[in-house]
Image (cartoon, rainbow, N blue to C red):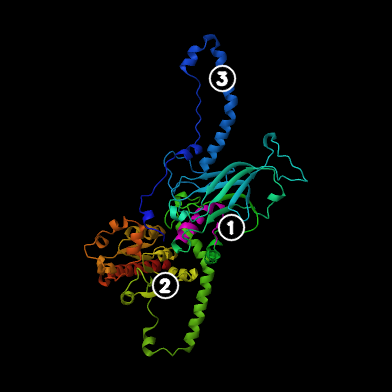
């Protein structure tokens, strides 16, 4: 999941600086000084005042109109606040402006730029060019000789921005691995060499799947959810243009992507054609960890709406899985022996709440997992063990968790699958030593925002394998925060890669008992509602 330390700083916001001034132009008119008036003869004052007023009006009227247009765009861009801008309030560029290129770089986590005009994404290049035609205000185009062409004519570059379209702007180490995308505005008489191989009638949305892609937490947190946030106002009418494109990424998330956009993706660096767009958004917007803040969405969408999209995306495949499992069950039942007398007397089996345990191997694994499973079954749970890896089909994971009543897992990237659980169900996160803040920030708070009942089980030093490796008074056991403060490498080596867990089952049982009672109460309430 990258580095813990990069998030342990307070959430930062960037004050308006030089960039802020270009977004908030201020008009200052110096009408004169006392010295000027003293030197002016009294009888010339009315004439001079009239002359000054007319002159300033002729100069300032065009600027005032331009200022008004810019201010209107910035209002739609949500940059009108005087105070610091947080990630949540920094706006996505609006398609209501005719500005050829405008960037918002004030958010802590991301940059985003908006382009509108005659936009060309050039092949084998990291450049996106917006060409402004000549001809405005009687402007003459460069001399064009049909026999020679415009090879000798230099293009006039009006604006040039560089952006890394990845949502971890503050993290220098990973951002250094993300390629720059150049955004250029030029004025040029278009010639056949600028012709489009493919012309699109919808906007392009450009972002990178580099960085931490390959880790399921970052694939959702840094990519899919920001893509949902950034594009909801486009109503699926946009083309995703992916830098650092991975074919496996599209295979893995194609079901979800097909419910976000009606168009197939483009590989920014791998496509040999020139693609033309009327608009482009470069860079995605992020609200917080694994969530959507409805206050900043066009129609107040929330993370539950994002989850509903996953429901629709995975249902066709889940339906097929269910049908396959039913066929297998019927085939086995036809071969099984008749029910015993005891089974006939007992009748149908009593319903049991389904508890899914996300199992780990190696670091942060639960050494006495088998005993925990037995305990949960004794309490009354139907237990299912899930060991997802990079090759596990997401639809199958979704089916298991979507049908569960509770999930248990140790803090780690696999906890991202809490997004697959139904609101109202229970998520128990086992929190190893040294991971308190990260466990709550990355998964605990997002679970509560999704509507899950979150239970954080913070282990005692005696439940960690580190207890047998360090003196019981060592800071590793007594003060993990001081160890984490030494840097990411200490956190990673000691707490993430260096410990296993031996649950105190007597202590842990209290969480299981309360979870069981909650799921039974939930089911009782559901039956009552259905019977009314």
Residue 275: x %, y % from top left: 64, 54
Q: Work out how far the residue at label 1 is from the one at label 2, CA to CA, in angstroms.
A: 35 Å
* Mark 2 Cα shell of 10 Å, populated few (<14), some (14-19), many (≥20): few
Residue 60: x %, y % from top left: 57, 27
Whether residue 242 appears in magenta in the rendering, the answer is yes
Q: In which quarter of the image is residue 148?
A: top right
Q: Name the residue under label 2.
A: 387
Name the residue rendered at 63%, 50% in the picture. Answer: 120
Residue 269: assigned label: 1
The magenta-colored residue range is 218-245
Q: Work out how far the residue at label 3 is from the one at label 1, CA to CA, in angstroms.
A: 56 Å
Secondary structure category for the residue under label 2: loop
Q: Is the residue 76 above or below the residue 211 in the image? A: above
| Closest to the observer, 53 or 377 | 53
Q: Work out how far the residue at label 3 is from the one at label 2, CA to CA, in angstroms.
A: 79 Å
| Closest to the observer, 222 or 128 | 128
Question: Quick one: which residue is furthest to the front in this view?
Answer: 152
| Closest to the observer, 496 or 453 | 496
Q: Is the residue 511 above or below the residue 194 in the image? A: below
Res. 406 visible in picture: yes
**On the rendered structure, is 175 left or right of 66?**
left
Residue 189: x %, y % from top left: 69, 43
Mark earlier in primary sequence (3, 1): 3
Name the residue rendered at 37%, 86% in the picture. Answer: 345
* Mark 3 Cα shell of 10 Å, populated few (<14), some (14-19), many (≥20): few
Residue 261: x %, y % from top left: 57, 58
Task: Give the mark toward the camera: 1 or 2.
Answer: 1
Q: Mark 3 points at which residue?
A: 52
Secondary structure category for the residue under label 1: loop
Mark earlier in primary sequence (3, 2): 3
């Amino acid at each position: 999941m990258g580095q813990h330390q990069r998030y342990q700083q307070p959430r930062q916001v960037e004050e308006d600086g030089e960039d802020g001034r270009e977004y908030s132009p201020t008009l200052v008119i110096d009408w004169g000084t006392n010295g000027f008036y003293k030197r002016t003869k009294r009888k010339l004052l009315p004439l001079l005042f009239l002359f000054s007023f007319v002159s300033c009006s002729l100069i300032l009227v065009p600027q005032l109109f331009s200022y008004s247009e810019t201010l209107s765009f910035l209002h739609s861009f949500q940059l009108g606040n005087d105070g610091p801008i947080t990630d949540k309030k920094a706006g996505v560029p609006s398609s209501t402006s005719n500005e050829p290129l405008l960037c918002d770089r004030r958010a802590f986590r991301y940059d985003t730029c908006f382009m509108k005009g005659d936009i060309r994404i050039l092949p084998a290049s990291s450049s996106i060019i917006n060409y402004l035609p000549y001809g405005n205000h009687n402007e003459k185009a460069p001399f064009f000789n049909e026999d020679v062409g415009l090879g000798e004519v230099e293009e006039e570059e009006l604006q040039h921005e560089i952006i890394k379209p990845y949502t971890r702007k503050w993290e220098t180490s990973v951002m250094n691995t993300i390629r720059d995308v150049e955004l250029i505005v030029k004025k040029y008489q278009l010639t056949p060499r600028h012709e489009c191989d493919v012309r699109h009638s919808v906007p392009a949305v450009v972002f990178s799947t580099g960085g931490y892609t390959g880790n399921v937490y970052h694939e959702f947190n840094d990519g899919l959810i920001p893509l949902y946030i950034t594009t909801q106002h486009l109503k699926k009418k946009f083309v995703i243009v992916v830098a650092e494109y991975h074919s496996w990424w599209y295979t893995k998330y194609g079901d979800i992507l097909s419910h976000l956009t009606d168009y197939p993706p483009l590989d920014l660096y791998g496509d040999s054609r020139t693609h033309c767009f009327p608009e482009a958004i470069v860079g995605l917007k992020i609200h917080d960890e694994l969530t959507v803040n409805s206050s900043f969405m066009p129609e107040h969408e929330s993370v539950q709406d994002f989850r509903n999209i996953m429901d629709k995306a995975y249902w066709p495949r889940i339906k097929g899985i269910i049908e396959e499992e039913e066929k297998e069950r019927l085939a086995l039942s036809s071969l099984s022996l008749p029910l015993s007398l005891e089974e006939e007397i007992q009748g149908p089996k009593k319903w049991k709440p389904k508890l899914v345990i996300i199992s780990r191997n190696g670091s942060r694994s639960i050494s006495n997992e088998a005993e925990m499973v037995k305990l949960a079954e004794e309490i009354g749970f139907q237990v299912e063990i899930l060991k997802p890896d990079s090759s596990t089909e997401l639809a199958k994971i979704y089916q298991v968790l979507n049908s569960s009543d509770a999930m248990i897992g140790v803090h780690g990237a696999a906890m991202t699958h809490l997004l697959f659980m139904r609101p109202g169900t229970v998520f128990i996160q086992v929190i190893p030593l040294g991971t308190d803040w990260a466990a709550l920030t990355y998964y605990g708070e997002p679970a509560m925002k999704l509507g899950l009942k979150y239970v954080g089980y913070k282990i005692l030093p005696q439940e960690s394998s580190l207890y047998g490796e360090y003196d019981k008074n060592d800071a590793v056991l007594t003060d993990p925060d001081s160890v984490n403060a030494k840097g990411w490498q200490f956190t990673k080596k000691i707490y993430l890669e260096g410990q296993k867990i031996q649950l105190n089952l007597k202590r842990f049982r209290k969480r299981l008992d309360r979870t069981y009672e909650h799921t039974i109460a939930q089911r009782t309430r559901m039956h009552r509602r259905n019977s009314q």
